[in-house]
Image (spheres, grey):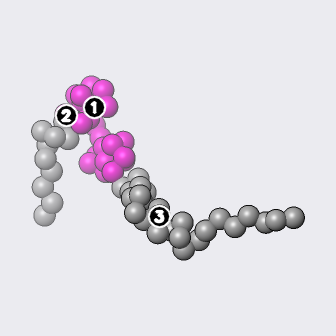
Amino acid sequence: MTRFDWPALMRAGIAGLGLRPAEFWALTPVELMLMLGVGAGPPPISRARLDELARAFPDISEKG
């Protein structure tokens, strides 16, 4: 069973997102997570990974 850190979620929803308490408590945990951006796609890549990709797929300029 997953436990929620309710004090942290309340701070994020009420203080961070500016929700009123009634709005916060009307949300499902999934809705709150979406509003907070949790699981909204892959995390940004690191500089090392970007450099690795640049080496693997270099830009090639065509000379006319």
Q: Residue furthest front?
A: 63
Residue indicated by mark 1: 16
Labels 3 and 2: the sequence-earlier one: 2
Determine the secondary structure under disc 2.
helix
Q: CA distance from mark 3 to mark 1?
A: 34 Å
Image side of residue 10 versus residue 33, left or right = left
Labels 2 and 1: the sequence-earlier one: 2
The image position of residue 40, as x and y in percent, is 41, 53
Q: Nearer the viewer, residue 48 or 29?
A: 48
Residue indicated by mark 2: 11
> Is 26 one of the magenta-colored residues?
yes
Determine the secondary structure under disc 1.
helix
**Residue at left offset 36%, top offset 42%:** 35
Quadrant including the C terminus: bottom right
Residue indicated by mark 3: 51
Cβ atoms at labels 3 and 2 below 8 Å apart: no
Taking the image as drawn, is residue 22 in sight?
Answer: no
Total residue callouts: 3
Looking at the image, residue 24 lies above or below residue 43: above
Labels 3 and 1: the sequence-earlier one: 1
Q: CA distance from mark 3 to mark 2?
A: 37 Å
Looking at the image, residue 25 lies above or below residue 47: above
Magenta-tinted stretch: 11-38
Q: Residue furthest bottom?
A: 56
Looking at the image, residue 11 lies above or below residue 35: above
**Residue at left offset 19%, top offset 34%:** 11
